[in-house]
Image: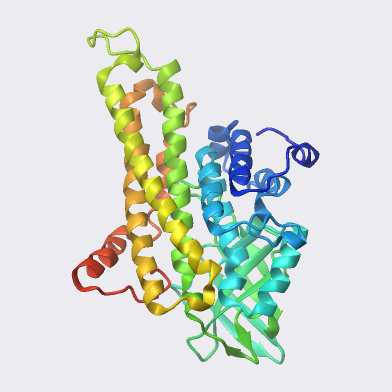
Amino acid sequence: MSTTTAIEWQTRPAAVTAQDWIARAAEVAAVLATGAGARDRAGAAPYAEVQLLKDSGLVTLLGPVEHGGAGQGWSAAYRVVREVAKADGSIGQLLGYHYLWNWAARLVGTREQWERLEAVAARERWFFGGAVNPRDKDVVVTEEGDDLVFSGRKTFSTGSKVSDVTVLEGVLDGTDQHVFAIVPSDSEGLAFHDDWDNIGQRLTESGSVTIDGVRTPWSSAAGYADKEFQPRTYNTLNVPTIQLVFVSFYLGIAGGALETAATYTRSKTRPWLHGGHERAVDEPHVIDTYGDLTAKLWAAEALADAVAAGGQKLHDGPGAVTEQIRGEFEVRVAAVKARATEVALEITSRFFEVTGARSTTTAEGLDRFWCNVRTHTLHDPVAYKRGEVGRWVLEGALPEPTWYS
């Protein structure tokens, strides 16, 4: 990867509008694209890549302008994630998760909590990780006076090893209440393990973490006031928001795969000896395949942008979010999640049909696109997303807010 310095990024024209920031993300992607296949094979912790996200200012995209942030909304954030993921799916995922964890205080916390957190996060350019897996009650939170103590183990902790702060989640002892708190990633008692060895998203540092008596003040428990949680319907937008993050880097990876494949086809793919064409780009089946896959990608991107725009209205007016509004939005999110999954898997497997046998060499590293999509799309079964849409169509049933819907 290019060793572009922070000073060099500062000499670029200031990014102001959403389009400016999407263009900045494309610049970052161009840096990440250099050696992406080799970095994926090495699987080393992406400290340099995270520093690039900081130096370029992308980490503060959602932060308040008065504290050094860009003041952009989620529609821009999703597009930025998509651009970065074109070059490196792992870094696209890390950035998208960072945005969600950075926004988590606003989703769940009190106004005082999120205003304080967002200010310091923007000023210090914090990068967020998360040790959150609410499916299992694997971390217990106990009270000790004015402190909370987290103890247990999480199977996944995406980004935490390379982050400044980590979102912890656990169940308050003796209750079924989940507690979220943000702690420094170098806190005593946090041990991140080098056991992430999956076929895809290899640079996301999504391995397990041991949480051994990590202490934080009760006042840092997101959304709690006087040790009582203050619920809002807006709290439940955490799932559709992160699902749109997934959509963003799925489509980014798919777009990057198509761009990389097209470059290969133009420069290296040989025409079939019995086809009667001198260039691969003149082969009718090659032209048809690229047209087919591109049309499907563009359609999925358009749907994603439309759903994101609808979601932005909910983030702009959190107090007006009702169960009905939230449920209808989740149905739309479920639809685009299902479509993006299908399109990304098809593109990242079918492009080999028009790049040829020689494109499967390890040195080319083109398999990383499919490996990345295949790995993360197993996060939650897409059939259940289609089911949310189907039940709404047939019976008008809205999805019940859960940790996955």
- Check the image and name the residue furthest to the left: 394
Give the x, y percent position of residue 273.
26, 9
Lateral position of residue 13 relative to residue 34, left or right: right
Q: Residue 259, located in which quarter of the rendered image?
A: top left
Lateral position of residue 317 relative to residue 120, left or right: left
Give the x, y percent position of residue 147.
70, 86
Q: Is residue 163 visible?
A: yes
Quadrant of the snapshot with the C terminus: bottom left
Give the x, y percent position of residue 85.
52, 43
Q: Residue at x 75, y 66 (%)?
A: 120
- Check the image and name the residue furthest to the right: 7
Of 18 and 239, the residue lying toward us: 18
Q: Is residue 202 visible?
A: no
Compared to 121, does 1 lie above or below?
above
Lateral position of residue 33 relative to residue 14, left or right: left
Q: Residue at x 72, y 34 (%)?
A: 3
Q: Residue 400, located in which quarter of the rendered image?
A: bottom left
Give the x, y percent position of residue 379.
40, 59
Q: Residue at x 55, y 52 (%)?
A: 76
Compared to 376, does 183 lie above or below?
below
Of 234 and 259, the residue lying toward us: 234
Q: How many marks?
A: 0
Q: Residue at x 41, y 57 (%)?
A: 307
Of 359 and 92, the residue lying toward us: 92
Q: Residue 4, located in which quarter of the rendered image?
A: top right
Colouring used for the render: rainbow
Compared to 324, does 314 lie above or below?
above
